[in-house]
Image (tube, rainbow, N blue to C red):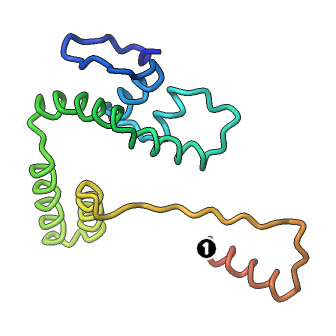
Amino acid sequence: MAVRGAKPSPATPKARNLTSKQMTFAQLVAAGETKSDAYRKAYNVKTVKASNIAVRGCMLAKNPQIAEMISKLKDPVAHKVGLTLESHLYTLQEIALEARAAGHYSAAVAAEVARAKAAGIHVERHENRNLNVNTQLSTNEMKEIASRLLGSV
């Protein structure tokens, strides 16, 4: 299964032992899609939970053959625009310093967070907590939950 609208280029590396879905996934990730979105587009996920999609996307990207393909597909694009991790981090650092000097602290923080993400230092984690509605809660527990919910609004 190929990426919709994408035409194979002569520079595209050959897929060794990758299924068409794995190749599609690699192409989408290399093109900038998140692993979850790439997994959704490459595979049939109608009956898969969102949390499982994220896990499957990460696991798939860790497959050595797929990781190598993603890297090979990214390299020509990065080379074409002259982008390296070092230059990207340096540019983000300049943006953060200029924003801070101008008093734009939210922009400075955003640039620093982007820089940390690019360097692999900052990793976003999401936690889902599900409340079992069949559980009997005391009045104090219900008040505590309500106050936490209202406090987050």
Looking at the rendered structure, the secondary structure element under dot 1 is loop
- Label 1: which residue? 152
Q: Between residue 134 and residue 23, name the one nearer to us.
A: 23
x and y, in percent, of residue 24 in the image = 42, 23
Q: Three-letter amino acid code at disc 1?
A: Ser
Q: Is residue 26 above or below residue 105?
A: above
Residue, far front: 17
**Picture quadrant of residue 43:** top right
Residue 68 in the image: x percent, y percent? 28, 34
Residue 28 in the image: above or below residue 98: above
For residue 93, side relative to residue 106 (left or right): left
The residue sitting at 80% across, 84% down in the picture is 141
Decide: is 13 above or below 73: above
Front residue of this view, candidates 31 and 105: 31
In the rendered image, which quarter contains the C terminus? bottom right
Return the x and y of residue 131 as percentages of the image width and height.
Answer: 77, 67
Disc 1: CA contacts within 10 A as few (<14), some (14-19) or many (>=20): few
Q: Position of residue 50 (x, y in %)?
A: 61, 45
Say which quarter of the image contains residue 6.
Answer: top left
Residue at 57% x, 64% y is 127
Total numbered labels placed on residues in the image? 1
* Near-viewer residue (124 or 151): 124
**Quarter holding residue 133:** bottom right
Q: Residue furthest bottom?
A: 140
Q: Residue at x 39, y 36 (%)?
A: 33
Residue lying at 48% horizontally and 23% vertically, measured from the top left: 21
